[in-house]
Image (tube, grey):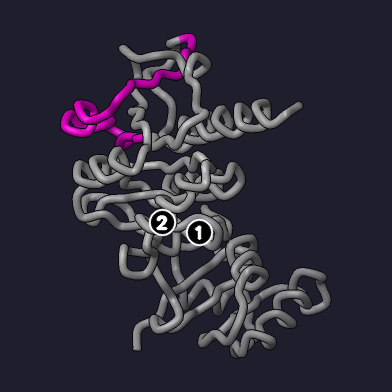
Amino acid sequence: MSALFLYGKNAVLEYLRSSSGEARGTLYIARDPQSPEVKYALERARLLGLVCVACSRRELAEHHPGIVHQGFVLERSSADARPDMDAVEFDWQAVLGAAVDRGEKPKVLILDQVQDPGNLGAIVRSAAQFGIAAIFIPREKASGLTPAARKSASGGENFVPVVRAANLARLLDLLKAMGFWIAAACNDGGTALAAFDFNFPYAIILGSEGRGVRRLLLEKADQRLVIPMTGHIDSLNVSVAAGIIMYAMYAQKIRNSLP
C-alpha cells in the first residue's frame, strides 16, 4: 500500500488537531520529548491510532532527503489520505448550490495551472483563514496537494476542499448557472479591486505564475480584476495576489455585517 507524507511542525500538528476517528500511519518525531508541542502531538497521535516513533534529525533527513521537516514527519497510508478531492469525494455542486440557496454568498477560487506547490499551499492556508468555500485546480499541468504544498498550507487543506476539475471552462459554466459571478485577476485592463462589490456568490480566477489566466477563461469571466500597484515590479506572486483578494472579500463581508 502506498503512503502519503506530511511534514513540518505546523502542518503535522494541524492535521493531528483537526482529525477525528481512527487513522493509519506512523508519526516520526525528532524533537525534545518534553516540549509542549511534542507532548500534544504524541497524545493526539495515540488517540487517533497512529504509531509513534522517536528518532534523530539525522535519521529523518536520511529517510526524507531535501525536505525541511522541522522534526515532524507523518506517514499516512493511501487508504486514509486524500491528496486532492474530486466530485465523487466532495459534492461541490450540492454543497455550493445549497449555500447559494440559503443566501450565504460563498466565495471560491479557481487556480489556472498554478504549478508551484508552495504557491498552492500558501493560497490554501490563506483561504482557510478568510472563509473560502472551495478551491478548484485542473487535473493536468498544475500542482496538486503534494507534501510540499501541504507543508506550506499548514493544515489549511483540512478546512478548504481542494477540488480537481477536468475542464475549468465547463466549471465556469456550471458556477454561472448556480448564480456565481466570475472575476479573473489580471495585471491590467480591469476594474480596481477596491471598486468591486463582492456581496454575491463569487468565483475568482487566478492564473499561473508565468502565463496568467488563459484566454478562454478570460473570455468566460464576467469581470476583470486588477490590484493597483506602483508598477516598480512586473506583477505579484500569485499567492500574494490571492491573499490580497481574499482579504478584500472577507473585509467587505465583515463591513456589510456591521449594524
Count numbered badges in the picture: 2
Along the line of sight, the residue nearer the viewer: 91 or 61: 91
Image position, residue 160 (x, y; %) = 50, 55
Nearer to the camera, 128 or 230: 128
- Residue 167 shows which numbered tag? none
Q: Which residue is mark 2?
A: 162
Q: Quadrant for the C terminus, please.
A: top right
Residue type marked 2: Val
CA gap, disc 2 to disc 1? 7 Å
Q: Is residue 87 visible?
A: yes
Query: As displayed, is residue 204 above or below residue 15?
Result: above
Q: Earlier in the sequence, mark 2 or mark 1?
A: 1
**Residue 52 sits in quarter:** bottom right
Q: Are marks 2 and 1 in contact (CB under 8 Å)?
A: yes
Q: Position of residue 27 (x, y in %)?
A: 59, 81
The type of residue carrying mark 1 is Glu
Q: Determine whether 28 is above or below 215 in the image.
A: below
Residue placed under numbered mark 1 in the picture: 157
Q: Point out the stretch of residues depicted in magenta.
A: 205-230
Residue drawn at point x = 57 percent, y = 45 percent = 131
When asked about the image quadrant of residue 54, the answer is bottom right
User: Does the stretch in magenta take in 223?
Assistant: yes
